[in-house]
Image (cartoon, helix red, strand yellow):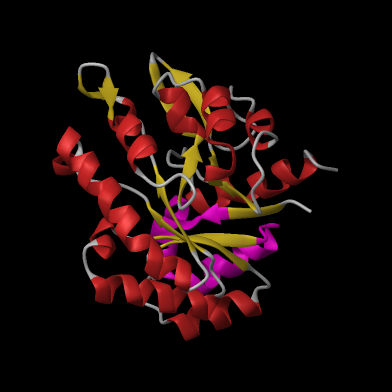
Amino acid sequence: MVKIALQLWSVKEAMEQNPEETIRQLSEAGYDGVQLAGDYGKSGAEWKQLLSENHLGAAGIHMPVTALENKDELDHWISFSKEIGNKKLIIPFVDEEWRTLSGYKKLSRLLNEAYPAVSQAGLQLGYHHHDFEFTAVEPGITGWDVLEEMTEPDQICFEVDVYWTEYAGVHTYNLLDRLKERVFSIHLKDMLEENGHKRTAAIGHGTLDLKSFADRVDTDWLVIEQEHFDGDPLEEVKPSANVVKRWYK
């Protein structure tokens, strides 16, 4: 059975104001789990209780890239994950200082070096991209090329964000087919284009054939994300869970 989660970055303001009520409403809207973007000031024990009370699972944690360079920080996220039942630690973003050939090489090395500690804890480690990774850092070489080639293929995974691949002009089907089992998570975000500008949209309100992307991967969670809104973000993301579930009825 397909499980549907929301990346909580989508409702970051609501999570900052009232995480308990936000999580409750997402559960009632039909989500099976959530993907965390940080801990929102709560301990692992508090998160375990919050998820349990709302019958939700953990579909990954986005942790800062600093965790790859700081053993105590990485150990925190490993312990936190084990406490709440999370299996995937994901680096979600790097600042511009990393977006060079040497920066991506360093990032690849750090991911490889962090893997043993993550793996020994029974967890997986991966990287979530945006569009900038597909920009050339040297003639004929993109940041993505470096990450894909220099990270250990049987160890480091990727969270493919189909909005950002399409935004960057990448052939998403080819990418998913090439990476195969290295895709351990997928972000489903629809796309609208207005006045020459692209933006995210609620599932089913854009132009992307998201089900065809989802059908191409073998993951335990399909993770919904939305970054642009016309109204209240929490209300706008609610219907997306059941839109995706209807694909598989």
Pinpoint residue 30: horizontal percent, then vertical percent: 70, 57
Residue at screen point 64% across, 44% down: 240
Q: Residue furthest top?
A: 196
Q: Is residue 94 left or right of residue 155?
A: left
Q: Residue furthest bottom?
A: 45
Q: Is residue 95 left or right of residue 191?
A: left
Question: Which image quarter holds the C terminus?
Answer: top right
75 part of magenta stretch: no
Q: Is residue 171 left or right of residue 26?
A: left
Residue closer to the observer: 153 or 57: 153
Question: Which image quarter holds the N terminus?
Answer: bottom right
Residue 42: quarter of image:
bottom left
Residue at screen point 56% across, 67% down: 23
Q: Which residues are magenta?
A: 6-32
Residue 107 seen from this side: yes
Above or below 16: residue 194 = above
17 part of magenta stretch: yes
Residue at screen point 69% across, 63% down: 28
Above or below 122: residue 114 = above
Pinpoint residue 22: horizontal percent, then vertical percent: 53, 65
Q: Residue furthest right?
A: 249
Above or below 35: residue 207 = above
Above or below 136: residue 99 = below
Residue closer to the observer: 236 or 90: 90
Residue closer to the observer: 213 or 12: 213
Residue 100 seen from this side: no
Residue 140: quarter of image:
top left
Residue at screen point 74% across, 51% down: 2
Residue 203: quarter of image:
top right
